[in-house]
Amino acid sequence: MVKGILDWELWEMTFVDSDLSKSGWWQRNASRIILGGFVLLLLLLSFKYTFKALESRSAIQRWQPQLLDLDQGEDIARKYQYPNPPVMAVLLYPLAKLPPLAMALVWYYAKVGMAFLAVLWTWQMVEGINRLPWWSLLLAITLSLRPIIGDLQHGNVNLLVLLLCVGSLKLWMNGNDLAAGMVMALAVSCKVTPALFIYYFLLKRSWWTMTGGAIGLALFLFPGFVPAAVLGWDANQTQLFSWFDEMVKPFLIEGKVTPEHNNQSVPGLLFRLLGEFPSFTTYVDGTYTPLEYHNFLKLDPVVTKRIVQLLMVGFAILMFFYCGNCKTQAHSDATTRTALVAELGLVFLGMLIFSERTWKHHAVTLLIPWIVLSARMARIPFWNLEKKFLLGLVITCTLLMSVTSTGIFPQRLAKLGQVYGGFTFAFLLLSWGMIVIMKCSKRTTP
């Protein structure tokens, strides 16, 4: 499994070719320098994060007392609304034993490594043996930086989930289907949104991957033999069912959605703009208090729920019609390879679009579509209409997401940018871009 993920031979093919002796120093070392600079930047930002951790404002520090309560047999999902399934708590539990500052910093530096591997493996997936220009890697990293830095500073688990998903997909593209399914199952067991990849593997008729996924779900989620080995069988079942009741059932069965402005998913956007749900709220003496509304209509929540469900069905239909590139052909054809990774990018975008809640730092998964766009633009001529479209898409999406930033615009304007879904529309446009790449690739593939 480890050999399949790391695939150091592919590293050599990616960064070294037979003509390097004829190339300049920069051409030989540009990719390594860019990746090194990326890691160095994230390490330097740890100084800023340290001040935050000293004030105990990191998400993982907030979870620390909850994780430690596992020793007391507490049902942390029910008591604290702990947001992830039991296996995630088990993975983080050893960190919770550290002093709060040490816990936060160890987690930060571990996630820097995760970010590096996620970028490297995604780049290897899209590049293959067909060397890409250095500027496309630099562009992709630059476009991906904001949510990666946001998740590092927030101290959440999104980079871990991203790494598991990317590792699974790299295994899958390298032909290690059973292991790919098991790793993806661990990602699903840590945070449920990667479950969309189950549908994707079903479309690809990747039966060994589905088999690995079933084994992995049994190990990590339900019945969850791995977390049960740590927590005990009954305690694990209690934690799991409480998590389902608190985090999954309200959205999946009851149709409840977080409508506040910082939710950038399509359900969040539609509920606050089409119904009487507040965009801004607060708590006064412990009482939930709406502050502002920005809805255009006053639709019944059931109607809005049906609209969301129709959109989800529409997205599934799009995947059915467009996710048809051949994995075997992708090994030898660069265009098909880019289109195949574009399929993966579309699935990652679907995870963001249809989640019950999508905060800005959840968008670390934009790494995949950004790398796909950069790679595709590097492989087609400048005068090509598709390249002009993709360049316009990059600029438009960057502007839409920038409008939501309180670090760039006045706070009120940035908050309104979130109310009206700056990130949401960027997700939708990027999905369009993935489909365009898939369609245009089919036209140019012999």
Image: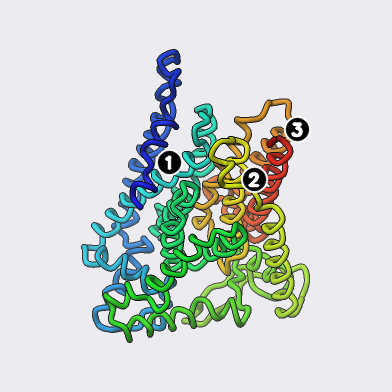
For the residue pair 276 and 384, the one nearer the viewer reads as 384
Task: Determine whether the residue tagged by mark 1 lies in a helix, strand or loop.
Answer: helix
Above or below, 72 against 304 in this view is below
CA–CA distance in space, label 3 to label 2: 18 Å
Instruction: Name the residue: 43% across, 26% down.
Output: 30
Toward which corner of the image does residue 28 lie, by quadrant?
Answer: top left
For the residue pair 272 and 265, the one nearer the viewer reads as 265
For the residue pair 305 and 231, the one nearer the viewer reads as 231
Q: Residues within 10 Å of mark 2 (few under 14, many from 20)?
A: many
Q: Nearer the viewer, mark 1 or mark 2?
A: 1
Instruction: Name the residue: 39% across, 43% down.
Output: 116
Task: Determine whether the residue tagged by mark 2 lies in a helix, strand or loop.
Answer: helix
Q: List the residue tagged with mark 1.
A: 120
x and y, in percent, of residue 221 in the image: 41, 73
Instruction: Name the residue: 75% across, 32% down.
Output: 385
Toward which corner of the image does residue 161 lie, by quadrant?
Answer: bottom left
Q: List the residue tagged with mark 3.
A: 385
CA–CA distance in space, label 1 to label 3: 29 Å
Residue type (three-letter) at the residue carrying disc 3: Leu
In this picture, residue 277 sits left or right of residue 239: right
Q: List the residue tagged with mark 2.
A: 397
- Earlier residue among tags 1 and 3: 1
For the residue pair 352 and 235, the one nearer the viewer reads as 235
Circle 1/circle 2 CB separation < 8 Å: no
Residue type (three-letter) at the residue carrying disc 1: Leu
Above or below, 363 against 281 in this view is above
CA–CA distance in space, label 1 to label 2: 23 Å
| The furthest residue to the top | 22
